[in-house]
Amino acid sequence: MDRILESIPGKYRWFDAVHVAGRSTPLSFRNNRLHSLSESENSGFGIRINRDGRTGFSYTNDSQRKAGAVERAYSMAPYGDPENFSLPSDTTLDFEPYDPAIDSFSVKDEIEAAEKFISDMRAAFPEISIDMGVSASSGVMRLMNSEGVDLSYRDSYYSVSASCVLVMDNGVRIDTWEGKSDLRPVDYSEFKEILIEKIKRAQLQEKIATGSYPVILPPQAFSRFAGIIASGLNGISVWKGVSPFAGRLGEKIFSDKFTLADDPLIEGSPYRIPFDAEGVNVSRKELIKDGVVQRFITDLKYAERLGTEPSGNASRGFSSLPSPSFTGVTVEPGSSSFKEMIAGIERGIVAEQFIGLGQSNTLTGDFSASLDLAFLVENGEIKGRVKDCMMSGNIIDLLKGDVHFSSERERKGSIVMPYTMFPAVSITA
Amino acid sequence: MNDRFSEAAEKGSKLLQSAGCEFAEIRFSSGVGTTISLSGVNVDSMTSGESLAGSVRVLKNGSWGFATFNDISSIERFFNSALTAASIASPDEKSRVAQSGSVSAVFRTEPVEDINIITLDEKFELIKSYNKILQSSPKIQTTKAIYRDVNSRYLYMNSEGSNLSYEKMHCGISLTSVAKDGSIIQPFHESVSGYGGYEIVRGREELAEKVVKIAVDMLSAEPLEGGTYDVILDPRLSGVFIHEAFGHLSEADFIHENPRMKEQMTLGREFGPVNFNVIDDGSIPGLAGYIPFDDEGIYPQKTYLIKDGILTGRLHSRETADKMGEGVTGNGRAIGVMRQPIVRMTNTYIDNGDRSRDELFDSLDDGLYAVDVIGGQTNLEMFTFTAGYGYKIKNGKPGKMFRDVILSGNVFNTLKSISMIADDREMFGGLGGCGKGGQSPLPVSYGGPHILVKNVLIGGRK
């Protein structure tokens, strides 16, 4: 801290700096066998300085050249936009997103577990090719500012993913995966059953004609669509006027079953944070409640521009300026279970994976994507795979109309989502 | 910093001489870059930063160990951790690499206008002037204009005695206008980049004018009705098509340990019409996918993937080349020193055919002209990509403009449905790049001539 102060060449209004350091141990399995084992150790430093209301920024990951970064940030400041917010001084550290159990990560045990997983999958499908990634990392994030904040927290992260490819005799390719992340090493043997069931079903081919059908999106698939909505709730796109929700606070845009929250405190999520990257304290906030748009997410800069309280959503790496982003997104559950949803469908689709989703003009909620992995539902039962067709529509319109959320939810990474059913979605075959 | 770089390099080369394993390589890089990002009337960010990176990759007893770090002065410690990592597992099936001779060379980008002598003020004024053009219609809601340059130094050394260095200058701009009319919002984007100096970004006013015009025109374009169409792809789209739909399929790491894929991708198999040629070539200077050597110390080459409609080659890393008993092609690439090289494309294109652009249009009584590209994705069997926009064609003449033109299909069937190939190839590459295995963006370029493809599925409502 003193070294930073010494390096600032002249007068300033405020500054803040982050220093991050971390180590990780990723294991990679390719085509059913251990391919490589890595060790990684990295650190970096970034600083922004406000001079006369304008802010400059610079970074380095060369620990001997921090003073140079401070000087560069200072000299860049006159190019910045006027910014008149002030930095927080009341930052509190109530917990660390860290579980000491991360130290129990054993490379040998993980290799053994992964090899067992692969051999079990091969017992079910001798021709299968599996890639896996298992990784443990831990680090320290330190935030310092000119208002007296100097806080550090440790973080830990464990992740595992398994991706399976099975090419059938007729050339049809089945490519599916499961993954999860946590604060500490966790068991993932449940992937086996889930993947085996998906692959078995995918081997049976079903046909569906062009038309409008009920579609169920499992949590992972629905999160891609919820992401389109979430990006419209970002203060940046609201301020730029490209969000479909700009100027519509308090308006009921969606079905009253739809409640979406930003939650930086999701239990077990390795993405949870005690305070945001500018030192603003965080809490769970409902952004859409019963279909009504309640608020947007901001950092200090966009809170000032939009004239609201900062929401505590600043995120930054050492090499970038803070910018508003989500640390956790949750959608409230509904009343019927996934099973009950399926039982109520005469002819429809469960869509797990897409190709090309998010490549359309997502600003307006429009989408059109190929069904990569999707299953036919017939008379209340999940059948085989439907492919070579596209699903199109507008996610805002779909969430405005008749929509059903399941009673059960799943956490995948930083999101917690239910199964979601839309009674009529356009399918082109 | 240069001293410490050389010191680390010297230590590294000693470590490699006595590595005691099948193969080892050390990579170092240092870079200084400037990014200016403007949006509407605002300066989103203006950043100048530097980074330092090192990695060691070793193959010991058939197992790979990899270490990454930014404290390059501790190279000995990280070299040992890579060796230790490789020693933990003793796989039954061992990885091996194709050997290659020892090569030493120094490469340098030769810019027309060195970015280091251009002042920050000048760069700021240039991107500001483009940003002003991007806002030049009252229908423009917001813009994004990004200028980026990087000066970097890259050093590659391996246990075969190779020592390659590359002083790289890279520069580019990315321009976006977002047009709005009521509830319709239409963004349009263009980007140029390359290895060279300030000449790459100077004088791009026309590009900025095109971006505004198309964004505004697209406001009045209607979404295209879903269905099956005969489609003429413009050179950019035919380039993305070949990169996404076929290029990834030619990456040997998707093939080498999968018997079914191997069977599908048997060399000699017919893949397209007789005048259909597809090439990957990393040795073309100036293009975004140019590499003087790949990240495994192999020189790039011109590889025919399809020649006269027949599958003739594929892209290899050292490991896949050994595994499949084929020669290395110089396609082992990583997005940075901190990542392991995997099989990647460089500059990939459909070669010229013998028809003129006009002949393609004249042959089409009822179809679609799909222009430009927003994005694309493939799962190696099916692909989906989104054209920027398109026009219905009636009796050879382009008519009404449409948006949301999303093409999709089976890779193999679609390649066989190419019915005419024009002779007007162009190459493209911007500030973005290609993603694979969590490594994105990797600079690549792609291109082709206009091509006519029959019976393409277009997604859409109705």
Image (cartoon, coloured by chain):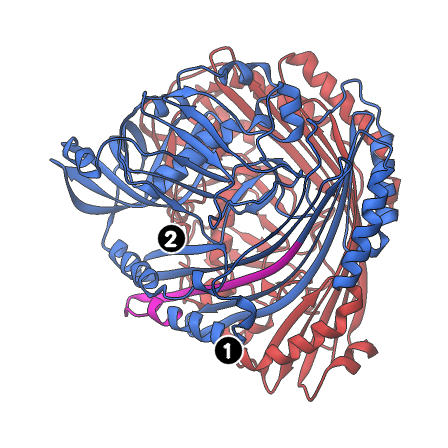
Chain colours: A red, B blue
The local secondary structure at tag 1 comes to helix
Q: Mark 1 points at which residue?
A: B121
Q: Which residues are drawn in magenta?
A: B131-153
The local secondary structure at tag 2 comes to helix
Residue B192 image offset from top left, x and y in percent: 43, 55
Left or right: B331, with B378 as reference point = right
Name the image quarter holding residue B224: top left
Foreground tag (1 vs 2): 1
Left or right: B424, with A23 as reference point = left
Q: Check the picture and name the quadrant holding the C terminus of chain B.
A: top left
The answer to whether B31 is drawn above or below residue A345 in the figure is below
Q: Do the residues labelled 1 and 2 touch (CB within 8 Å)?
A: no
Residue B291 shown in magenta: no
Does the rendering let one see residue A70?
yes
The answer to whether B329 is drawn above or below residue B290 in the figure is above
Q: Check the picture and name the quadrant holding the N terminus of chain B.
A: bottom right
Few, some or many C-alpha atoms within 10 Å of disc 1 (few <14, some 14-19, many ≥20)?
few
Mark 2: amino acid? Thr
Numbered badge on residue A364: 2
Q: What residue is drawn where x is 54% and y is 62%? A: B149
Chain containing the residue with disc 2: A
Judge by depth and name the residue closer to the eye, A227 or B203: B203
Residue A307 image offset from top left, x and y in percent: 51, 76
